[in-house]
């Protein structure tokens, strides 16, 4: 009895170990690392949708590479938005599942943890939303689908200076978040280079903080003409709300962390007129954008956000890269992606020598509870 | 002067909420020596109950807060019965691990339910918002007033229960010496259940008040809130009811003042205050130093 | 027979290492599995350090992750900022790595001493809160140091950790701990746990031993942190928040405090389990929570509470002709 149990356990172990190698035959396996649980689980859902939509569109019944037809299999791994779990996820996808490329993750900190593993293993990575410049510096196998923070910061500085005609800015940023801190630095740099002055610089400790009254009190006492809130939408909604309640009347501006239909719900009207930089606007009148928005609405019932479009584009880049490469192999795919020239909802995508795409940023504004498109700023 | 008063208002408003939640921690600890890690998650459940009550039943503020107090309270009693009571005579640390397990479950199970999910949800406005300007120029708004009034009312009610009723006397007896109390004919199990009930009710109320002030809820909101409230309870002297109230207020005010002074590190001020106080008063501000008998 | 028993643990570890390497070469075990094993061993080391403080000396520390962070960041600073691999010949690199890990451990131990000395006057749950507070303060302070990346995290750490080093350190930790516990130092610690007042009357300087245990426990955590930094190649302050400290607590008590085998079992099982349960995605943590509750309900002393695997317990040498009791 006991021996049978032992034997069956061994059998199970062997099966699991070899299971991954079973159907290697005519499959292209693409790994996707996203936060399915954890703090950014909502983003994870949009990412999943974006990837699936891309596969549906670019490889509806398989992908033909080098004259041979392949089935495209996407393997999603949860990274809980944590660096060490990301490392495990990358390892698993590369070693167990033998993926040819990885899409994701969606944050700089997690991308920095997983990047080196893929680089050593010669597996191309296209991160969706990691905006820190360091991410692609890890190695020549790491690409990103979004713009980088220095660009975003300077775009907003330009908008504040030229469109809002403000020369004194206050900033409230998240000290525990590399994205927020990075944007703050880049905005400050650009703004001051253009002759502006940051008159109040306030921080808060992390994404779990809900009370900003003390910082807003200080900001109110300064003579700032605009308040820059380069934070995630949930914190920003609260910040706007509290700021208006405290009597702050200056306009708000922010970054792509704002791009969510939930922000107006949380800000409850305080967001009216606030502008932010984004990777994507579902209102931009370009036909590719509208086509994508329609398809997304058809399949998933809601309007897509930046997470969805970036993961869609990252996946599309991988799929086209495979076709261009002509073979299902890491180094060839990497070279193909580096040389890629593809038209996507965000525009024409080409990578520069640092493997960052030359992408325009759009400025969006909240009006009447929805985001409206203001303008596009090219690099 | 105006600045100080304004900061004080912010601090007190935050502090009374910490106090409400800290009371739950301190009561449970006082009676069975357990740090109930799941307490913060009961706050979250209270907030969600109020959210659904308002959205689905169109409840108004009194009804929402009543339900938000009732349901976590019942849940807490159930948890005590199922997870903590069997371990009452076992090593204390086992109950602690169980509490951690319950907390992990409460954080993740609601997330899997389709109608809750991991999303942040905006909390509805249960009270009309109005700003009142005080003579000195500081601004007080209606939500802050409600926070303070409701919290104070609940704390007064609790103090009344603990000191002026038979049940309260039994609670104090059990926390003093469980065995002696049972020898005196007190149904210890029932009293412990009552303690959990009251503590969780306060937590649920705290959850609603917190959500009204910072109108955004999600399943993980209880983690940090619970930790801060726990620190407040220890600061005031764990096991002491007035200690928890004092500790909560101190935490709230210090946090706001420290953030105003140096926002980068403000949120950690609570920890520093705690360490300072414990260095000089190892049992917390109002805690009783247990005399060890040989 | 005695000699064999004496060397069994070392032989066992060596055999384990050879087996894993062979399986990896044969392709049966992928780098993924080996990486998980390495994480598991690092977690074991941290848990063993925590065991000394919580399990054997009866204290209650919830700050272990802070010490792992100190050790990790310090050793990473040495290998990445002070003596980066670019300026070293390949032969020197392992030496620098070893040095950095030890430095990480020593610095963490110093922090342990500085924090332990004033705090260990506090009892039970107060100590817990203070250690939690210190853990968070350490994390916030690390976040403020731009040279190690702050909230962006510390990237570019050379990945020196491999299976050999980790197995060696793992074995070393067990060896050190085992010798400590079965010595007069260890007995003093256990006396503090059992009844501090009685120990004091017996002439045991309880504060000294409590601080000593705290220092050693944090030093071990620091060493593990150094190994971790060079395994991941990347560190982020949020990895070491109090929730991580609670993770270590769970490993410790689920495995059984006061038992080295328990710590190893607990840490290994609870490191591997979440990875094995990846297919459950969102339900994974729900099941983890329920599993913890059930584990405690049915086995409150932990899996290996109070017991040790026999080869970890040294045989007590008795003088010739001794016949008496135990």
Image: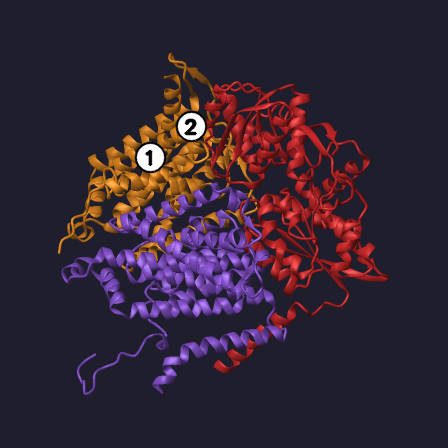
Q: Chain of mark 1?
A: B
Report if residue C272 is visible in the image.
Answer: no
Indicate left or right for A63 with C306 as reference.
Answer: right
Residue at position x 46%, y 30% in the image = B212
- Of the residues tagged 2 and 1, which is closer to the observer? 2
The image's mark for residue B260 is: 2
Residue A197 in percent (x, y) is at: 57, 23
Quadrant for residue B153, please give it. Answer: top left
Is the residue marked by circle 1 packed among few (<14), some (14-19), or many (20+) residues within 10 Å?
A: many
Indicate left or right for B76 with C41 as reference.
Answer: left
Q: Label 1 belongs to which residue? A: B248
Is the residue marked by circle 2 packed among few (<14), some (14-19), or many (20+) residues within 10 Å?
A: many
Q: Quadrant of the N terminus of chain C?
A: bottom left
Task: From the image, state the color of chain C.
Answer: purple
Residue at position x 63%, y 76% in the image = C26
Task: From the image, state the color of chain A.
Answer: red
Of A67 and C137, which appears nearest the observer? Answer: C137
Residue C272 in percent (x, y) is at: 51, 64
Q: Quadrant of the C terminus of chain C?
A: bottom left
Residue at position x 41%, y 17% in the image = B138
The correct choice, above or below, for A339 with respect to A376 in the image is below
């Amino acid at each position: 009895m006991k021996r049978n149990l032992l034997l069956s356990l061994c059998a199970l172990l062997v099966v699991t170990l070899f299971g991954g190698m079973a159907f290697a035959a005519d499959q292209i396996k693409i790994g996707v690392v996203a936060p399915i649980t954890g703090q950014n689980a909502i983003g994870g859902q949009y990412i999943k949708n974006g990837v699936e939509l891309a596969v549906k569109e670019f490889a509806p019944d398989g992908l033909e590479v080098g004259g041979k037809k392949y089935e495209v299999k996407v393997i999603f791994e949860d990274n809980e938005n944590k660096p060490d779990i990301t490392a495990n996820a990358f390892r698993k996808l590369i070693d167990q599942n033998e993926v040819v490329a990885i899409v994701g993750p969606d944050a700089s900190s997690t991308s920095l943890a997983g990047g080196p593993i893929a680089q050593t293993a010669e597996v191309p990575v296209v991160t969706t939303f990691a905006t820190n410049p360091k991410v692609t510096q890890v190695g020549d196998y790491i690409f990103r689908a979004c713009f980088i923070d220095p660009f975003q910061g300077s775009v907003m500085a330009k908008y504040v200076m030229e469109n809002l005609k403000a020369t004194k800015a206050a900033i409230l940023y998240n000290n525990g978040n590399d994205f927020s801190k990075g944007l703050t630095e880049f905005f400050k740099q650009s703004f001051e280079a253009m002759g502006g002055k940051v008159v109040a610089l306030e921080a808060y400790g992390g994404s779990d903080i809900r009370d900003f009254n003390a910082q807003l009190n200080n900001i109110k006492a300064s003579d700032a003409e605009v308040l820059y809130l380069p934070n995630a939408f949930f914190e920003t909604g609260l910040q706007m709300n509290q700021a208006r309640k405290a009597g702050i009347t200056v306009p708000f501006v922010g970054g792509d962390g704002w791009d969510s239909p939930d922000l107006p719900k949380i800000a409850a009207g305080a967001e009216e007129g606030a502008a932010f930089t984004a990777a994507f606007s579902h209102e931009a009148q370009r036909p590719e954008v509208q086509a994508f928005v329609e398809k997304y609405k058809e399949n998933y019932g809601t309007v897509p956000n930046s997470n969805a479009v970036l993961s869609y584009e990252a996946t599309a880049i991988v799929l086209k890269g495979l076709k261009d490469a002509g073979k299902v192999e890491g180094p060839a795919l990497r070279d193909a992606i580096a040389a890629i020239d593809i038209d996507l909802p965000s525009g024409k995508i080409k990578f520069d020598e640092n493997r960052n795409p030359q992408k325009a940023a759009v400025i969006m504004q909240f009006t009447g509870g929805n985001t409206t498109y203001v303008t596009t700023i090219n690099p | 002067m105006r600045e100080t008063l304004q900061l004080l208002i912010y601090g007190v408003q935050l502090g009374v909420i910490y106090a409400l939640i800290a009371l739950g921690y301190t009561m449970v600890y006082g009676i069975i020596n357990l740090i109930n890690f799941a307490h913060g998650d009961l706050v979250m459940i209270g907030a969600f109950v109020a959210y659904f009550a308002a959205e689905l039943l169109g409840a108004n503020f009194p009804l929402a807060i009543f339900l938000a107090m009732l349901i976590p309270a019942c849940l807490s009693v159930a948890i005590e019965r199922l997870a903590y009571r069997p371990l009452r005579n076992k090593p204390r640390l086992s109950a602690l691990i169980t509490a951690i397990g319950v907390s992990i479950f409460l954080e993740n199970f609601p997330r899997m339910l389709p109608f809750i999910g991991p999303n942040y949800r905006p909390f509805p406005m249960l009270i009309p918002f109005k700003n009142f300007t005080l003579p000195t120029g500081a601004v007080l708004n209606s939500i802050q007033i409600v926070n303070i009034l409701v919290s104070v009312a609940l704390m007064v009610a609790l103090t009344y229960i603990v000191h002026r009723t038979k049940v309260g006397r039994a609670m104090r007896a059990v926390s003093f010496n469980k065995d002696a109390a049972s020898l005196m004919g007190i149904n210890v199990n029932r009293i412990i259940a009552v303690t959990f009930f009251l503590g969780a009710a306060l937590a649920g109320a705290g959850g609603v008040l917190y959500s009204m002030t910072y109108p955004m809820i999600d399943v993980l909101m209880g983690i940090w809130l619970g930790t801060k409230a726990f620190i407040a309870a220890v600061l005031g002297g764990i096991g002491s009811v007035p200690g928890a109230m004092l500790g909560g207020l101190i935490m709230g005010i210090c946090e706001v003042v420290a953030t105003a002074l140096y926002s980068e590190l403000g949120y950690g001020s609570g920890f520093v205050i705690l360490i300072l106080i414990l260095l000089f008063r190892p049992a917390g501000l109002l805690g009783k130093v247990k005399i060890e008998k040989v | 027979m005695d000699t064999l028993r004496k060397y069994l643990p070392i032989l066992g570890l060596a055999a384990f290492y050879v087996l894993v390497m062979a399986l990896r070469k044969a392709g049966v075990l992928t780098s993924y599995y080996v990486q998980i094993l390495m994480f598991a061993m690092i977690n074991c080391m941290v848990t063993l350090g925590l065991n000394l403080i919580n399990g054997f000396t009866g204290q209650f520390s919830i700050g272990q992750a802070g010490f792992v962070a100190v050790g990790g960041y310090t050793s990473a600073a040495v290998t990445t900022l002070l003596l980066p691999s670019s300026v070293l010949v390949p032969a020197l690199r392992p030496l620098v790595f070893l040095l950095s890990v030890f430095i990480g451990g020593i610095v963490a131990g110093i922090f342990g001493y500085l924090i332990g000395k004033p705090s260990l006057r506090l009892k039970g749950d107060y100590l817990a809160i203070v250690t939690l507070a210190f853990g968070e303060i350490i994390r916030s302070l690390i976040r403020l140091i731009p040279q190690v990346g702050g909230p962006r995290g510390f990237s570019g750490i050379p990945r020196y950790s491999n299976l050999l080093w980790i197995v060696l350190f793992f074995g070393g930790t067990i060896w050190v701990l085992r010798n400590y516990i079965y010595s007069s130092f260890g007995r003093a610690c256990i006396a503090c746990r059992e009844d501090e007042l009685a120990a004091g009357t017996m002439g045991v300087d309880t504060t000294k031993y409590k601080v000593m245990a705290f220092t050693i426990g944090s030093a071990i955590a620091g060493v593990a942190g150094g190994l971790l930094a060079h395994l991941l190649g990347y560190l982020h302050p949020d990895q070491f928040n109090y929730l991580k400290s609670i993770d270590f607590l769970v490993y410790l008590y689920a495995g059984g405090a006061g038992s080295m085998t328990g710590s190893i079992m607990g840490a290994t099982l609870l490191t591997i389990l979440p990875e094995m349960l990846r297919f459950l995605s969102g339900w994974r943590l729900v099941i983890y929570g329920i599993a913890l509750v059930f584990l405690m309900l049915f086995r409150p002393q932990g899996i290996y509470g109070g017991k040790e695997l026999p080869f970890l317990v040294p045989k007590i040498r008795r003088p010739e002709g001794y016949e008496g009791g135990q």
